[in-house]
Image: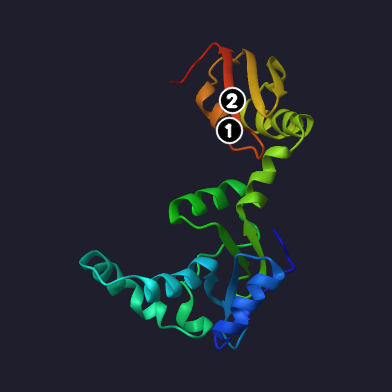
Amino acid sequence: MTTSVVAVRKDASFKEMADMLRRRRISAFPVLDDAGRVIGVVSAGDFLVKEAVQADSVSVLAALRHIREDDKAAGITAGELMTKPAITIGPDASAAAAARLMYDRRVKRLPVVNEAGKLLGILSRVDVLAVFARPDADIRDEIMFRVLAGVLAAPESIEVAVRNGIVTLSGELPAGEQSSALIAAARHVEGVVAVRDRLYGSRGD
């Protein structure tokens, strides 16, 4: 995450925020209440709503759309313009959890907050994707020394190869072991792009 975050209070003015977006070359910022808790997010898209609604010609379709957007278009402070509630995430969440949340809620960034809801940083899509730059050797070590040891009674029977984030597991599964748990655990290792199953023995599928 990025810990140097540009944030605004809920009473920040439209002009102040627009100028900040331009000068700091950012696309959004969290909105904080008086206690420093994240209560919403203002993005460049929220500013475009005002411009689009004010400039749009009157039509049936425009009128229907504006029913949902008029309040935001009339906003002049962060508290009126922001999208709320803010979709946030905790500092200990995994990259996979952040990716799922971004995908499910259709957001491009996540304010990172502590248990009290206070801002610690912000996580962007680029930050989440950075996990896939993890070295293959680090991925292999984690799978060999943490995943295999945690799932199998005899992990030395399995070979692990990692190339460009793609994990290949090969070898004979110990008697009574199942491949499904091992494959699932490997897929959840940060930086893994895919897992290829070259295991034989007890399948568990």
Dot label at residue 187: 1
Numbered marks: total = 2
Residue at x 58% of width, y 83% of height: 15
Q: For the residue labelled by badge 1, is the local secondary structure a helix, a strand or a loop?
A: helix
Q: Is residue 45 left or right of residue 74?
A: right
Name the residue beneath numbered marker 2. 195
For residue 139, above or below residue 83 = above
Percent of width and height locating residue 105: 44, 56
- Residue in the image at 45% along x and 82% along y: 80
Q: Amino acid at mark 2?
A: Val
Could you tell me which quadrant the N terminus lies in?
Answer: bottom right
Quadrant of the rendered image containing residue 109: bottom right
Image mark for residue 67:
none
In the rendered image, residue 150, in percent from the top left (x then y), is placed at: 65, 33
Quarter of the image for residue 35 reads: bottom right
Q: Are marks 1 and 2 in contact (CB under 8 Å)?
A: yes
Looking at the image, residue 6 lies above or below residue 181: below
Label 2 element class: strand
Specify the quadrant that holds the C terminus. Answer: top left
Q: How is the image coloured?
A: rainbow
Q: Earlier in the sequence, mark 1 or mark 2?
A: 1
**Residue count near mark 2 (Cα–Cα under 10 Å), binned few <14, some 14–19, many ≥20:** some
Where residue 46 appears, x then y in whole percent?
Answer: 48, 71
